């Protein structure tokens, strides 16, 4: 399953960033998010035992969701992500070696950028989608300006300070999608609370259609 496949099938262009998720809660939390309609799930590598969560989630939900790792900072981490069955690799920065390794392994890539120079470095290394981070610090107008110079086939995602209240602004500015962390999940949140936020987030996206 690819990100192109998911989006073409009508899945919301929303990546759930589950920073701090523990393996013991990974399956229940994933089930709630998928039930709410969110089909892209990211476990940042600075979470407890992220590879254990990713492997379990992939085994259980890999046919219904695109599951992978975030805050991937080294070539070794890329390999570990691939070996655990992860399908999407998200980074907060632009590291051409990390991006190229992910491309070589056939992972879906969503590397972080802030400047046009970083955006073009990521594209040159093999990325077809890039993640503006931290997005809220720069704003939707920044996306519009950067997209004027990017290749038309490159999708921009906004991450950092995004949520149900701003998804419309980001999509209107030209973003393909958004990643949502703290506005959706924080360590210690109940499954019910996260499910409710996910439903609200998907509903906010549907209002943009």
Image (cartoon, rainbow, N blue to C red):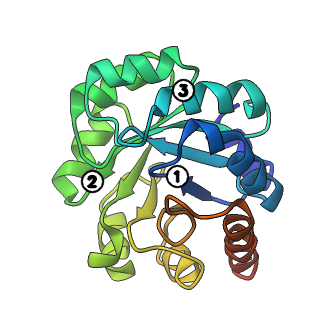
Question: On screen, 45 above or below 102?
Answer: below
Nearer to us of marks 1 and 2 is 1
Q: Which mark is residue 8?
A: none
CA separation in Å, label 1 and label 2: 20 Å
Mark drawn on residue 18: 1
Residue 50 locus on image (x, y percent)? 47, 34
99 to the left or right of 28: left
**Quadrant (top left/top right/bottom left/bottom right) for the C terminus:** bottom right
The answer to whether the residue labelled 3 contacts the one labelled 2, judged by CB atoms less than 8 Å apart, is: no
The quarter of the image holding the N terminus is top right
Q: Is residue 45 left or right of residue 92?
A: right
**How many neighbours does mark 2 have within 10 angstroms: few (below 14), some (14-19), or many (20 or more)?**
many
Q: Position of residue 13 (x, y in %)?
A: 63, 59
Q: Residue at x 69, y 70 (%)?
A: 193
For disc 2, the marked residue is 113
Query: Badge 3 is on which residue?
Result: 52
How busy is the neighbourhood of tag 3: few (under 14 within 10 Å), some, or many (20 plus)? Answer: some
Viewed as shown, does residue 196 lie left or right of 144?
right
In front of the other: 181 or 122? 181
State the separation of the CA atoms marked 3 and 1. Answer: 14 Å
Q: In the rendered image of this protein, does residue 90 appear above or below residue 142?
A: above
| 10, 68: nearer the viewer | 68
Front: mark 3 or 2: 3
Which residue sits at x=79%, y=61%? Answer: 36
- Name the secondary structure under disc 3: helix
Q: Is residue 21 visible?
A: yes
Dot 3 or dot 2, earlier in sequence? 3
Q: Earlier in the sequence, mark 3 or mark 1?
A: 1
Nearer-N-terminus badge (1/2): 1
């Amino acid at each position: 399953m690819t990100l192109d496949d998911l989006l073409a099938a009508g899945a919301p262009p929303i990546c759930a960033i589950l920073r701090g998720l523990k393996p013991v809660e990974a399956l229940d939390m994933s089930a709630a998010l998928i039930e709410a309609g969110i089909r892209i799930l990211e476990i940042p590598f600075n979470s407890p035992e992220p590879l254990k969560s990713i492997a379990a989630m992939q085994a259980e939900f890999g046919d219904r969701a695109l599951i992978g790792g975030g805050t991937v900072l080294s070539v070794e981490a890329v390999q570990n992500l691939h070996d655990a069955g992860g399908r999407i690799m998200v980074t907060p920065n632009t590291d051409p070696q990390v991006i190229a390794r992910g491309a070589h392994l056939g992972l879906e890539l969503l590397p972080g950028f802030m400047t046009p120079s970083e955006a073009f470095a990521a594209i040159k290394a093999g990325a077809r989608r890039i993640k503006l981070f931290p997005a809220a610090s720069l704003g939707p107008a920044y996306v519009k300006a950067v997209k004027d110079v990017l290749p038309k086939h490159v999708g921009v995602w906004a991450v950092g300070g995004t949520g149900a209240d701003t998804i419309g602004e980001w999509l209107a500015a030209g973003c393909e999608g958004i990643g949502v962390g703290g506005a959706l999940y924080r360590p210690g949140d109940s499954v019910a609370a996260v499910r409710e936020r996910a439903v609200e987030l998907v509903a906010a996206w549907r209002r943009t259609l």
